[in-house]
Amino acid sequence: MIAPTAHSITESSAPSVSSGGNGRSVAARLRGVTVSYGGQPALQNVSLDVPVGEIVAVVGPNGAGKTTFLKALLGLVPLDSGSIEVFGRPIDEVRSGVAYVPQTETVDWDFPITAGEVVVMGRYPHMGLWRRPGRADVEAVQGALETVQMRSLARRHIRQLSGGQQQRIFIARALAQGADLFLFDEPFAGVDAQTEHALFELMGRLSREGKTLLIVNHDLSILDRFHSVLLLNRSVVACGPTAEVATPENLRRTYGGRLQFVERAEQALREGPSDVSARPRR
Ligand code: ATP
């Protein structure tokens, strides 16, 4: 199990918050970030630091702005106001350092591509116009496949892999890209307990190697497996070490009236995991 860290996300509306909590360097720093669609704010005045190596659950009800938060970190949505730095630099300068790991269910599996070819796509930002993989690209792809233990299945069509294996391939693509900040969109949705355990093991390994992982997660029963939690409902409700932040009171503040589900989460946090998800398991 991933142990909670002493200090993790630090949040402040004051722009003077300095380098990552515990003296750890900062992977992502947001200050006063507001993003709107058609004049309606989806994220409002979000300020926080995410230290390098952190595994963070990004939690909130539907429409809370979680996906918008990931998109903002990827530089895919314009900011109304505020600033975002990734590894101390503007996003435009470090794009290949940030990788999005999609929800496997949103991927078009009819696209004729092998698992290995998906990983090679991670090298595109590094290849020339003709996208011919060079030696460094091949090494990066093989190393990434090795890390996620998927070398033997690299020639399979991506559709022929299980959900957990597909997740591994997308993680390998991010590794091949050379990313240090990984943004996951519900990686545990619809996976069985064994796959979930294996994914957490892999994520723990990535964290120990200095990767930072921000993970949109709807399953409140597994929050204790994350170092820290960001409770989001358009603005930051609370963020920091899981044990301090994932309290019934904070969860109620985040989810508002959805008390029944928060009560089941409380029970799970007291008694250990059960199926407490804000979203039905598939
Ligand atoms: P969910 O858990 O349902 O995936 P979320 O927390 O990821 O939700 P977002 O997808 O970030 O929430 O959406 C936040 C708000 O912004 C919602 O009210 C949503 O309807 C709105 N929104 C998101 N994308 C767009 C868009 N492209 N155009 C207009 N409104 C949008």
Image (cartoon, grey):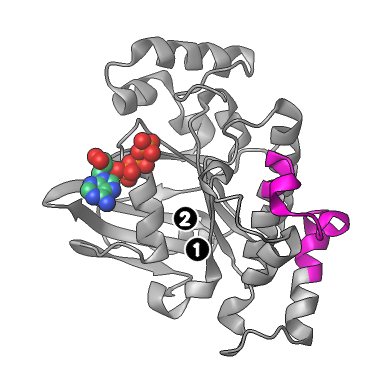
Report whether 62 appears left or right of 165: left
- Quadrant location of the N terminus in the rendered image: top right
Residue 204: x percent and y percent?
70, 47
Residue 247: x percent and y percent?
44, 23
The correct choice, above or below, for 197 with respect to 29 in the image is above
Residue type highlighted by circle 2: Val
Can residue 27 be seen in this snapshot?
Answer: yes
Residue that mark 2 sits on:
50
Numbered mark located on residue 27 in the image? 1
Given residues 4 and 72, the one toward you in this image is: 72
Residue 6's image quarter?
A: top right
Element class at badge 1: strand
The correct choice, above or below, for 170 with respect to 262 in the image is below
Residue type highlighted by circle 1: Ala
Can residue 43 be seen in this snapshot?
Answer: no
Residue range in magenta is 142-166
Is 161 a magenta residue?
yes
Mark 2 and mark 1 residues within 8 Å of each other at the beta carbon: yes
- Quadrant location of the C terminus in the rendered image: top right
Report whether 229 appears left or right of 40: right
Given residues 231 and 125, the one toward you in this image is: 125
Assess disc 2: are there few (<14), some (14-19) or many (≥20) residues with their C-alpha within 10 Å of its C-alpha.
many
Query: Quick check: is the Cβ at mark 1 less than 8 Å away from ligand 1?
Result: no
Residue 20: x percent and y percent?
47, 59
The correct choice, above or below, for 95 with respect to 39 in the image is below
Is 133 a magenta residue?
no
